[in-house]
Image (cartoon, rainbow, N blue to C red):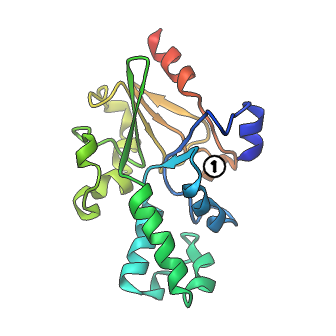
Amino acid sequence: MFALLENDSFNFDHDRLFALGDIIDRGDNSEGCLALLNEPWFFSVLGNHEAMFLELCENDNSTLLNKNIGNQWLEKWLKQKDQLVQWAHAIQHKMPLTITLDFHGFTIGLVHAKAPERWPTQAEKRVSLAQHNEEIWDRTEFYNRTGLTPYRGTDIALMGHNPVRKVTLHGNRIWLDTHHTSGHLSIVKVSQLVELFRK
């Protein structure tokens, strides 16, 4: 990731990086990715893997560890409750369900899996996960995307969760989770997105 940022001349003092969730369980440094939540230049929406982490912590249930989902890294931390509580607190307070960016009159909505029917206001972002399961788990909309009409909640909707080989665009929805399928992260500049939709 840092090599990509350097290649894009990312300025850590002035630029901002927004992620689409699942910053854990997707490599060999989940701890380092969680530490990014303390950086002033990094922001992320909540992913289903963070939701599973919260469930594991809330239920104190080590049976939720599963190498198939990549969270076996937590095994060595199960006896260090203070650290788990710290991470859970960071996820709960720094990873909202949605993030809205306003760039030169364009609204760009970030959500992990599926844009909600009505884009939430700032006051509505802290919500019950049980009430908003689709936003972090849904795959149906992605696989049925050929029948989708343009999303009306924001000008552009960015999502991860569903693996794609390359950045995939349908209408004003964009899926960016290229790492799972191709092994490569994708970084898209907001200015490039706006330019694309201005045409």
| Residue name at image x 51 percent, y 47 percent | 43
Query: Which secondary structure, mark 1?
Result: helix
Q: Residue at x 49, y 49 (%)?
A: 44
Is residue 94 visible to us here?
A: yes
Horizontal and vertical percent position of residue 85: 46, 77
Please rate how many residues cluster around mark 1, counting C-alpha atoms within 10 Å: few if below 14, some from 14 to 19, many from 20. Answer: some
Instruction: Please name the residue shown 61% across and 41% down the image.
Output: 165
**Residue extending furthest bottom?**
79
The answer to whether 170 is drawn above or below residue 187 in the figure is above
Identify the residue at the far top of this view: 199
Q: x%, y% of residue 30?
A: 62, 66
Left or right of 40 on screen, residue 107: left
Front-lying residue, 27 or 89: 89
Q: Is residue 67 at least partly visible in the picture?
A: no
Residue 59 position, x and y percent, is 36, 84
The front one of 47 and 81 is 81
Foreground of the two, 3 or 93: 93
In the rendered view, tell whether residue 6 sits above or below residue 193: below
Classify residue 197 by image quadrant. Answer: top left
Q: Position of residue 37 (x, y in %)?
A: 54, 56
Total number of numbered discs in the rendering = 1
Is residue 75 depicted above or below 107 in this figure? below
Q: Which residue is mark 1?
A: 179
In the drawing, does residue 153 fall left or right of residue 64? Answer: left
Query: Which residue type does callout 1 highlight?
Result: His
Residue in the picture at 45% in, 11% down: 198
